[in-house]
Amino acid sequence: MSEPLFNFDQVEVRFGGLRALRGFSMEVEQGTIHALIGPNGAGKSTAFNCASRFYRPTSGDVKFQGRSLRRVKPAAIAKLGIARTFQNVELFGRMSVLENVLVGMSPRIGGYLPFVPGARRMRIEREARRDAEALLDEFGLTDFRDTAAEELDFGRQKMLDVARALACKPKLLLLDEPAAGLRNREIAALDALLVDLARNRGMTIVLVEHVMQLVMSIADRITVLNFGAKIAEGTADEIKVHPEVIAAYLGTGHA
Amino acid sequence: MNAIDRRWWLGGVGLIVLAAGLYLGAPIYVLYVANLLMTYAVLAIGLDILLGRAGQFAFAHIAFYGIGIYTTALITNNTGLPVFVGIAAGGLLAGLVGVIIAIPATRLRDVYLALSTFAFAEAAQWVFNNWDSVTKGPNGLRISPAKLFGHTITDDRQAFFLVLSITLAVIAATVLMNRSKLGRAMSAIGQSEHVAMASGIGVQRVKVTAFAISAVYAGIAGGMFTLYQSFIHPDSLGFDLIVLILTMVVVGGLGTLPGVILGVLLLGLMPEVLRNLREWQELIYGLILILAILFMPRGIWGLITERRQAWQARRVAARPSPVQDET
């Protein structure tokens, strides 16, 4: 078996007495859509925050392309090729839609100085703007290019969040509840978009999601967390009938 | 050319006409006020970089202004160097001290950052007051007329063009910065540090850079001060000045360059209008600051852009959501 693109290896995260993740392991294959599900407080966001290096695991390791992320700075994660979105949509609200995407492109644009641009910097900036506009076009946001992100409706904000994450051309996309709060129509569009990214463009996607309609239709593989520990892993069909999963979601009385 | 570019062009042409008119026709006192307002503008734009853009509530600004004033004044007093050397030295020294302060200070948040930077400003004022051999302490320091390529700048009219050129250069640099990766990174940090971090922005490094640039601006403003003032006393580098600059930035609109300039003009001209109420001035500024925070947290410019965006939103509201077409 080939080495996974991204994996959690016996990751343990403790906050004081709370064990948010208990020896959690998960392997994500290149080009697949991998869903991470579980009840609230199961440790899904904690897992993402370890991958973003907002947290460092108490023990164990998160690896990307076989490389440990323990000593990687949070700001260097995007440069390695890992991008993410956030639960409840977090954008740079007062910046324009285009600027939000340009911030996502930061890893491509070299250093912060000089801000009085030379010819080379201006070319890079021009290319970045062109690519950003292409991305906006793809996400149906061209008409809102100069609109402040906070002025967008919720569905478009979610789309912009994904566009911002994709702007750095990541190899791995971590989506934290991308479908939450979306209408059915919008979920169907998101479904099509994610499938296209994975099947036609080789993107590897890990998504935390409560909307089972989306998870069951697009996930190649599903990992189920409960109280910080993995209780099941498999395809959608396997997970649907897994007794422990049913118990975790419905309460033990129904198992 | 998009609408934003056109606005800048129109503003620029208007400014040149105004400047030429002032230079040729205005009485010397008006030019003094103009010089003072431009100095405030550079101070306010610098404060806004840190406060309005990067969202860092730091108040060491007046200390850097003082460093700029004393550095430029001492170079002018003791050497025959052209004044630009002194101004550059003041800006650089302020920036250097800014970096040294920023490295620990930017690890603090909110009220702790505000308090520690405020304490630094107080300490700096104490140094200006007590380092007699250099600053002449509480006696104040005479500033010799600035020299530039053999000319000596003796009045506000002669200083006007220099002050104006520096102000315009600062504004141009700010516009370029706001549109660059650095400017976007600063805004991003001001609005969400962790999303900025996940987008690959080195939060700590950008904060220190913002702090340093803000300090350089204040240092340059200090240098500008020496072009038309002949005396500096440490008492004029205190709390009331930071309140004034802060009020200008907040009333005009945090994080917006046109707003900040508007705020400087409005509040800077107020003492000229309310001349008879001089003893009430502090109270009036304080009240304006509180009222602005309560009723227009995004300043006058915020109100203007809200109107504009509401208008734009109505224009595109009729269009269908992009995802509806795909189902």
Image (cartoon, grey):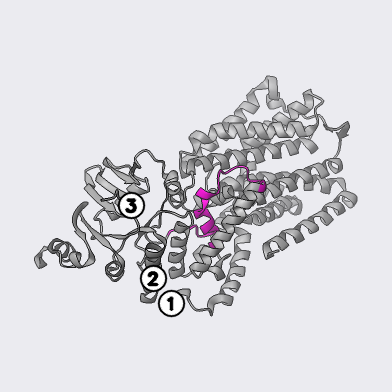
Mark 3, secondary structure of its residue: helix
Mark 1 residue element: helix
The part of the chain drawn in magenta is A90-119
List the residue tagged with mark 1: B326
Element marked by disc 2: helix
Q: Residue at x 73, y 50 (%)?
A: B271
Q: Position of residue A29 (x, y in %)?
A: 30, 55
- In the rendered structure, the residue with mark 2 lies on which chain? A
Name the disc covering residue A192, or none: 2
For the N terminus of chain B, the quadrant is bottom right
Q: Which residue is mark 3?
A: A48
Question: Magenta stretch mostly in which secondary structure?
Answer: loop
Image quarter where the C terminus of chain B lies is bottom left
Amino acid at the residue labelled 1? Glu
Q: Who is closer to the viewer here, A9 or B236?
A: A9
Q: Position of residue B318 (x, y in %)?
A: 53, 80
In 3D space, how far apart are the residues under numbered discs 1 and 3 (Cα atoms)? 30 Å
Q: Mark 3 is on which residue type? A: Phe
Q: Chain of mark 1?
A: B
Q: Is residue A111 magenta?
A: yes
